Amino acid sequence: MLDEKSSKLIYNVVKEDEILDQRITSRIQKTTQEHGQPSDILPDIEQIEHRRPTNADVEAIYFLSPDPHIVDCLLADLGKKRYQGACLLWTSRE
């Protein structure tokens, strides 16, 4: 789980494909626009600011910046028990 600021930091160090290749991300099911039918199941690195389904069967790794709106998003996730468990890493404020 990343936010806008932390994703810039992460992607300066490692490419998204390298993370996805490690199979540590959740899988999301994409639907076709025409019929709303399931199509492909793809790996995804989720953004905390975006709408996401509850995935109570997996644990999440949060790598977040400590901005107030991001902390609010995190508290909302924890309150909804969106994931089975979580590991939280903060970036610096700068």
Image (cartoon, helix red, strand yellow):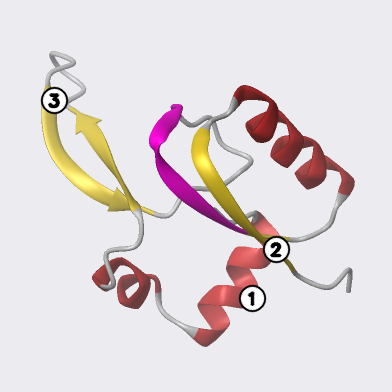
Q: Where residue 61 sits: x, y (%)?
A: 53, 57
Q: Residue furthest top?
A: 35
Q: Where residue 12 sits: x, y (%)?
A: 56, 83
In this view, 11 is above or below 69:
below
In this view, 67 is above or below 5:
above
Residue at position x 64%, y 54% in the image: 3
Q: Amino acid at mark 2?
A: Lys
Q: Amino acid at mark 3?
A: Pro
Relative to residue 65, is residue 61 drawn left or right? left
Question: Mark 3, residues whose alpha carbon is within 10 Å: few (<14), some, or many (≥20)?
Answer: few
Q: Amino acid at mark 1?
A: Leu
Whichever of labels 1 and 3 marks the residue nearer the N terminus, that label is 1
Question: Mark 2, residues whose alpha carbon is within 10 Å: few (<14), some, or many (≥20)?
Answer: some
Magenta residues, start to end: 53-62
Q: Circle 3 is placed at which residue position?
A: 38
Q: Which mark is residue 9?
A: 1
In the rendered image, the quadrant that contains the C terminus is bottom right
Q: Is residue 49 magenta?
A: no
Question: Mark 1, residues whose alpha carbon is within 10 Å: few (<14), some, or many (≥20)?
Answer: some
Q: Circle 2 is placed at which residue position?
A: 5
Residue at mark 1 to residue at mark 2: CA–CA distance? 7 Å
The reply to whether dot 1 and dot 2 touch (C-beta < 8 Å) is yes
Relative to residue 68, is residue 1 drawn left or right? left
Q: Residue furthest bottom?
A: 13
The reply to whether dot 1 and dot 3 touch (C-beta < 8 Å) is no
Residue at mark 3 to residue at mark 2: CA–CA distance? 32 Å
| Mark 2 secondary-structure assignment | helix
Q: Is residue 60 magenta?
A: yes
